[in-house]
Image (cartoon, helix red, strand yellow):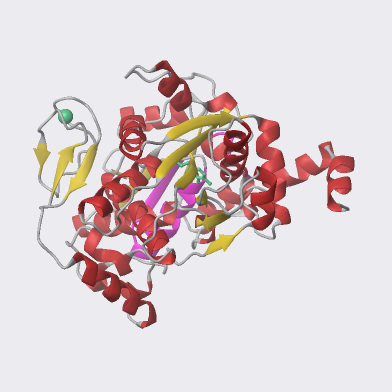
Amino acid sequence: MYLQCSDRRCSTVLDIHDRSLSCRRCGNLLEVAFEPELRDWPGLKRIWWERRVSGVPLDRSGIWRFREFLPDLYRPEEVVTLEEGNVPLLSAPRSAAYAGLKNLRFKHLGWNPTGSFKDGGMTVAITHAKYLGVTQVACASTGNTAASMAAYAARAGISARVYLPQGAISKAKLAQSVDYGAEIVQVEGNFDSVLEHLLRTAGGEAYFLNSINPFRIEGQKIFILGLMEQVDWNPPDYIVLPGGNLGNASAFGKALDELKATNLIGKVPRMVVVQAEGANPFVRTWRSGTESLQVLSEPRTAASAIRIGAPRSWKKALRALQFTDGMCLDVSEAEIAEAKATIGREGVGCEPASATTLAGIRKLIWQGQLDRDADVVAILTGHMLKDPDYVIRMRESSVGDLASRRST
Ligand SMILES: *Cc1c(COP(=O)(O)O)cnc(C)c1O
Ligand SMILES: [Zn+2]
């Protein structure tokens, strides 16, 4: 096992213990690479299934249960876990009808220990940090990465420092970081400038846990294995997810690539990435047909988790869309709000960024780009309680509208 440059035209390879986050030769992000090794991959499906009823902490985690797809560096007692990853795949008939689909399911990653998918990556990245002997970790965040890092760092006894854009994150997310004992640094500016500031000043000794960290990607990758197990290894036609810094899209692409290469799945689902219209650098880049990122200096959307103008993992995400024959699109603020209310009425709920998925699916059906019969899984990325102010704001601005819909 080793680290390699994520640009396949560059042959840079680094030792797995290297703390770099980008290639010294070309500047692209790094990724974890496994030695090709012959294994009884189909036999693993049974082992993974049997671990579900095990009492061993490592088996009880919905991430570490699939550890054959994770770095094999750590001793079991070293692993930092909160039994993350065990989240349901929910049928969503009302949302399906709203979008015009026959069949839609939600994989709710907001039902992880700290309320977002960040936990899937953080259990691996904090375990790796502990393995490396790191004593301080840091990240820039719109709130969820910070909350997750703070929780896992606390479990590991590592001190955590989170850099947040002042006044631009939800109170609920801020409260989590405070509660888990992280040091909070509020910085003037938006997420992009905070991350830029952090990377430039290098934060002293701290180990960085933004999604440019390749070990976070390894953990988030596993949600796709969990999903495939839930559908008995019959992949859906589409997997739809929101795109912010594009770490998750990169992780899911890597998972699909590795599952196909090991023949654990026969068909690769098409990946659809959805952004908000006011924060759509990836969509603009995709449309431009060029290989240069169309940065937005002032991204705008009420969905604060995806208010990002210069996504760091865009090249990895682009490769994932190409590999899966995927698409990307953007949706308006009104479309996000309406989709979010629909998911709420389903009895499920999610944070605003997650609702871009349903809004995107509806738009694709209207545009004739998605078949009504398609088997679609949408990824809900964050818990409803992450941003209660949004819900109250929407209700106050459209009381009559909501009330009339409720009575139908
Ligand atoms: C982090 C996050 C996103 C964006 O994910 P990326 O990997 O940055 O694209 C979307 N929704 C929620 C709730 C998040 O916490
Ligand atoms: Zn390189």
Q: Residue at x 44, y 48 (%)?
A: 237
Above or below, 384 against 226 in this view is above
The percent coordinates of residue 197 (x first, y second) are 39, 28
Above or below, 213 against 182 in this view is above
The quadrant in which residue 54 appears is bottom left
Residue in the foreground of this view, choosing between 27 and 257: 257
Q: Residue at x 62, y 39 (%)?
A: 362
Left or right position of 135 against 337: left
Q: Residue at x 72, y 40 (%)?
A: 338
The magenta segment is 143-170
Q: Is residue 166 magenta?
A: yes
Q: Residue at x 61, y 47 (%)?
A: 101
Specify whether residue 1 is in view: yes
The percent coordinates of residue 383 (x first, y second) are 58, 54
Q: Is residue 47 magenta?
A: no
Left or right position of 347 against 208: right
Above or below, 131 against 379 in this view is below
Residue in the foreground of this view, choosing between 140 and 260: 260
